[in-house]
Amino acid sequence: MKKLSMKLDDDIFQEAEEIASEMQIARNRYINEAVRVYNLYYKRRMLKKQLAKESNLTKEDSLGILKEFEKLIGEV
């Protein structure tokens, strides 16, 4: 486990303290969980962005193939 020194805005710190107390968990555990959840959220955002980019790259190819199939169907 890594040690970390950080500064939090007073209002964020106070809110985290209140929530951790209400949940009856240590501040350290609460912050670890918060960072883990944010990491999952951000990874999903990055994946969504990558999938959209790759989808756009294959869009033209897919439309081209569809047009070729339509031509073949029209010839039958």
Image: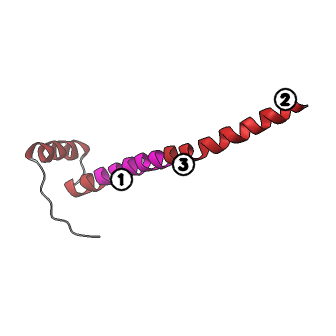
- Name the amino acid type tagged 3: Glu
Looking at marks 2 and 1 on the same chain, the residue that comes earlier in the sequence is marked by: 1
The quadrant in which residue 3 appears is: bottom left
- Name the amino acid type tagged 1: Asn
Residue occupied by mark 3: 54
Residue 70 is situated, as x and y percent measured from the top left of the image, at 78, 32
Instruction: Categorize mark 3 by other alpha carbons within 10 Å: few (<14), some (14-19), many (20+).
Output: few
Is residue 71 toward the left or the right of residue 11 in the image? right
The front one of 10 and 56 is: 56
Residue occupied by mark 1: 39
Between the C-alphas of marks 1 and 3, the distance is 22 Å
Residue 30 is situated, as x and y percent measured from the top left of the image, at 26, 51
Q: Which residue lies furthest to the right in this view?
A: 76
Looking at marks 3 and 2 on the same chain, the residue that comes earlier in the sequence is marked by: 3
- Name the amino acid type tagged 2: Gly
Segment tinted magenta in the rendering? 33-50
Q: Main secondary structure of the magenta part?
A: helix
Q: Which colour scheme is used?
A: secondary structure
Residue occupied by mark 2: 74
Is residue 73 toward the left or the right of residue 22 in the image? right
Q: Nearer the viewer, mark 1 or mark 3?
A: 3
Secondary element at image label 2: helix
Instruction: Categorize mark 2 by other alpha carbons within 10 Å: few (<14), some (14-19), many (20+).
Output: few
Q: Which residue lies furthest to the left in this view?
A: 10
Residue 6 is situated, as x and y percent measured from the top left of the image, at 15, 60
* Residue under the image location 12 percent in, 44 percent down: 14
| Mark 2 touches mark 1? (CB < 8 Å) | no
Q: Does the magenta stretch include residue 43?
A: yes
Q: Is residue 56 magenta?
A: no
Looking at marks 1 and 3 on the same chain, the residue that comes earlier in the sequence is marked by: 1
Work out which quarter of the rendered image holds the N terminus and state it.
Answer: bottom left
| Mark 1 touches mark 3? (CB < 8 Å) | no
